Amino acid sequence: MLFTGKTIDAQKAYRIGLVNKVVPLEMLLPEAKKIAETICETAPLAVRTAKECMMRGMSMSLEEGLRLEDDLQTYIMSTRDFEEGLSAFREKRKPKYTNT
């Protein structure tokens, strides 16, 4: 698609994993809000770190990207939010993240 400029329909995009879900146009905004709410309920540090890894990793070699991912994972696993997530999972409750 990048090199040929050919487009595909929504169903094919879904089949090949380019999109997560196909919805009617009138459901687009409600579905996007639902996904955004799900993201907002997850650990903010983890979301921020995943985004950083993705953005920085695009301009790196595979080896550099894997090293970055490992460094950021090590950082995340040292945070209070990581411990809170584990505790909440074990205790079957909703986590209370503090961005620390």
Image (cartoon, helix red, strand yellow):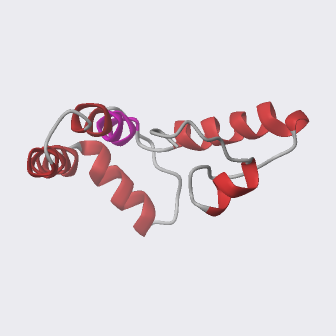
Q: Is residue 46 depicted above or below 66 in this figure? A: above
Residue extending furthest toward the bottom: 90
Q: Residue 69 or 10: which is nearer the viewer?
A: 10
In percent of the image, x 76 and y 40: which residue is there?
31
Residue stretch rendered in magenta on the structure: 44-51
Q: Quadrant of the C terminus?
A: top left
In percent of the image, x 43 and y 58: which residue is there?
88
Most frequent secondary structure within the magenta stretch: helix
Left or right of 22 on screen, residue 25? right
Picture quadrant where residue 49 is located: top left
Q: Residue 59 or 21: which is nearer the viewer?
A: 59
Queried whether the magenta region covers residue 45, the answer comes back as yes
Percent across and percent down for residue 60 are 15, 38
Left or right of 10 on screen, residue 52? left
Queried whether the magenta region covers residue 50, the answer comes back as yes
Left or right of 80 on screen, residue 97? right
In percent of the image, x 45 and y 42: which residue is there?
96
Left or right of 62 on screen, residue 40? right
